[in-house]
Amino acid sequence: LAAGQSKFHESARAQVAGAATYIDDIPEVRGTLHAAPVCSPVAHGILRKLDASAALALPGVRAVIDAGDIPGDTTLAAFAHDEPVFALDTVLFTGQVIALVVADDVMTARRAARLVKLEIEELPAVLNVHEAHALESYVLPPVQVSRGDAKAALRRAPHQIEGRFEVGGQEHFYLEGQIAYVLPLEQNQWWVYTSTQHPGEVQHWVSHALGIANNAVTVECRRMGGGFGGKETQAGHLAVWAAIAANQLKCPVKLRLDRDDDFMITGKRHPFAYHYRVGFDDSGLLCGLELEMLVNCGFSADLSGPVADRAVFHADNAYFLEDVAISSYRCKTNTQSHTAFRGFGGPQGVIVIERILSDIARTLGLDPLDVRLRNLYGMDARNVTHYQMKVEDNILDPLINTLAITSGYRERREQIAAFNARNPVIKKGLALTPVKFGISFTATLFNQAGALVHVYTDGSVQVNHGGTEMGQGLNTKVAQIVADELGVPFERVLATASDTSKVPNASATAASSGTDLNGRAAQFAARHVRDNLAAFVAGLDDCGAGAVRFEGGQVITDKATRRWEDVVGAAYANRIQLWSDGFYRTPKIHYDKATLTGRPFYYFAYGAAVSEVAIDTLTGEYRVLKVDILHDVGHSINPAIDIGQIEGGFIQGMGWLTTEQLVWNGKGYLQTHAPSTYKIPATGDVPAHFKIALWPEANREDNVHGSKAVGEPPFMLAISVYEALRDAVAQAGGDPLLVNAPATAEEVLRAVSA
Ligand code: MTE
Ligand code: LUZ
Ligand code: MOS
């Protein structure tokens, strides 16, 4: 079988050779023009005048496009309908796109964009969540979720901690920046090439802005050079802008953001601020938690509703919260509109409880691991979440205990204490943190998918599904699944570009559910074709269709063994349908959007990580020395790809919590808008000891090949790095409560010196 094997990523060779096509590699059609954005230089203001004369005077400039050129709705067809396509009379953040300059070449367009003169009357700007909360400036109404009586439980609790801290946002830093290339077809029909996780939504947004029907717009995406959530909605803006320009000029238009513009314009991970009161007993058992989350959503709602919901759903992480009250405020600020980013609010929920449990352990003089184990969800009792979902598939107790043994956690605790006693300057820290991540879109309707499987007369197979390839290996896994269903070698199956004219209304490839949804839809499509062929062969051999087996490139009955290719050829000659569709919807899920109660998730993915760090107490600088991970992907469809996802997710999470710092100045201008000042992890930051093992059990829910989703859950394992740094700060005699995230060297030094 192909599933279960570490097949190479279907594009690996082409990517290494530079032969894999990204949007900017597509040969340009004659007459293609290039666009560049004109952005607001202020965070909030009234747009009095736009003077494009100097820009238009530049040779090669064709037009300046703004809101007046939109044939359809000037508001984007986003969830909340609260975002103008181009700024209208007010500007709402520094970087907001007001207009586009279109020119013969991209450098001319970019130069001309800087010549557009804007007259803006500045207004006071709301730049942080505290101001926004005080003003009740929200993009969506607050949400409260509670169980039991947190206040009473806190009163009864033998111990209490009250705390506040902040967690920063994160730039997606996909290698391929945001881009769209829009081509006019005949009769007001359009072809859109875009680097997007959600071609269906781009199609809807473009048609809405152009005032035409969905069926006149086709959107194609072969692959992205990374998305990480940053191309779930944000790619749509570019496509809409380019489409408006293309429509106005009746020319193909390409819009590729330069890296600095990409930073300035597009939304990031939501920064959060927290205030909590937690009660606990002498054993570290939680009794009562009141938690307030202030979510920095930026200037519009975008996906902030479901992101903030997921943070609420993950504030328990792996632990039973008996009496709990959580309030979530979706704050509106004059900054970029923050959006999906790997984990989708989950990390911002998980980090709070992990931080709290470490602080409880330190208060009581216990090992944080013991406090974690003490509070885990139980198997039969203490197994219902604060949103009333039963945790039926919990494997954390054995998983954590296994990792603690294989990583030598307890012995290393002692070794580190001895090391720290000997060394006055360098101090080490250690932490084990688990993750329990809910799989399914929190927007329940997105949990559906479609696929097409085509078998050609030579026996080769194409599979097309509504998902998108962003490097995560979705197409590889789907091809493996289809190959097995048809009993043909993996090499016979080709996954093709996502295309809205093949599978309509597809959901975003997100929520880690790409393979669960599209893999199953493709499996069903392949099964339909196989059933057609089985019935045909059963007719030839006079047996039941159920007795026909498809394996090893052969079709086998008790009477005969035929080559797959021969069966396909004969079936075609006998007018048997050789292609089919498949559709899948996730079962069992439902919940009440108002109270956030029910079963939002089909199942949970689990994992745990042990991280060891060393800090220099004189400079605050540090290194991550050792990381051991035990992660649950069910029965892996492709272990190499899954381990790659775990490695990548972990390191990306480590970047979020260590060096990736977004700095907006007092006027709301993002100062860290390039790699010169915004530091993602580099190869040298990968720990020298980085060991990943997979938990051997299958998914207990009926999921494709017994697998589990893998894309996002490992991101949260990097919280072990953050907790290890705080442990080191504590061991250095500093104050770990002062360490906000990202725990930059400056932040560590401040806490150590306190
Ligand atoms: N891996 C790579 N290489 N590139 C990406 O952009 N995105 C992540 C994750 N892994 C991403 C990635 C995010 S945010 C999600 S939701 C999942 O992949 C989406 O793909 P899947 O559902 O097929 O796992
Ligand atoms: N819910 C979720 C969503 O859990 N993950 C997502 O990526 C998402 N996107 C849109 C709406 N709900
Ligand atoms: Mo991933 S944040 O769900 O695109």
Image (tube, helix red, strand yellow):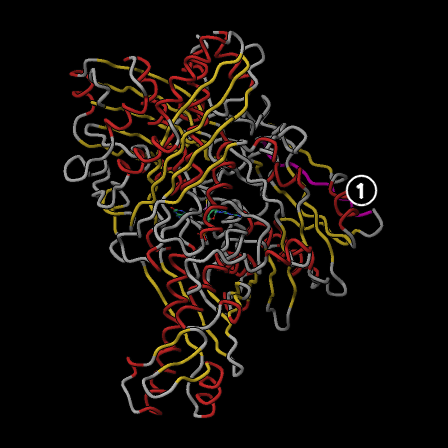
Residue indicated by mark 1: 54
Snapshot quadrant of residue 677: top right
Left or right: residue 516 compared with residue 161: right
Give the x, y percent position of residue 167: 45, 26
Snapshot quadrant of residue 596: top left
Question: From the viewer's perspective, is residue 271 above or below residue 32?
Answer: above
Snapshot quadrant of residue 674: top right
Which residue is more in the foreground, 523 or 73? 523
- As for residue 56 lying within the magenta part, the answer is yes
| Badge 1 density bin: few <14, some 14–19, many ≥20, Cα 10 Å | few
State the SS at label 1: helix
Q: Residue at x 48, y 76 (%)?
A: 454
Left or right: residue 144 compared with residue 711: left
Which residue is more in the foreground, 241 or 562? 562
Question: From the viewer's perspective, is residue 10 above or below residue 728?
Answer: below
Give the x, y percent position of residue 347: 41, 35
Give the x, y percent position of residue 81: 45, 48
- As for residue 505 lying within the magenta part, the answer is no
Give the x, y percent position of residue 606: 34, 41
Which residue is more in the foreground, 593 or 63? 593
Q: Which residues are magenta?
A: 45-57
Q: Residue at x 27, y 42 (%)?
A: 594
Q: Label 1 is placed on what type of residue?
A: Ala
Q: Quadrant of the N terminus?
A: bottom left
Q: Residue at x 48, y 12 (%)?
A: 751
Question: From the viewer's perspective, is residue 3 above or below residue 98?
Answer: below
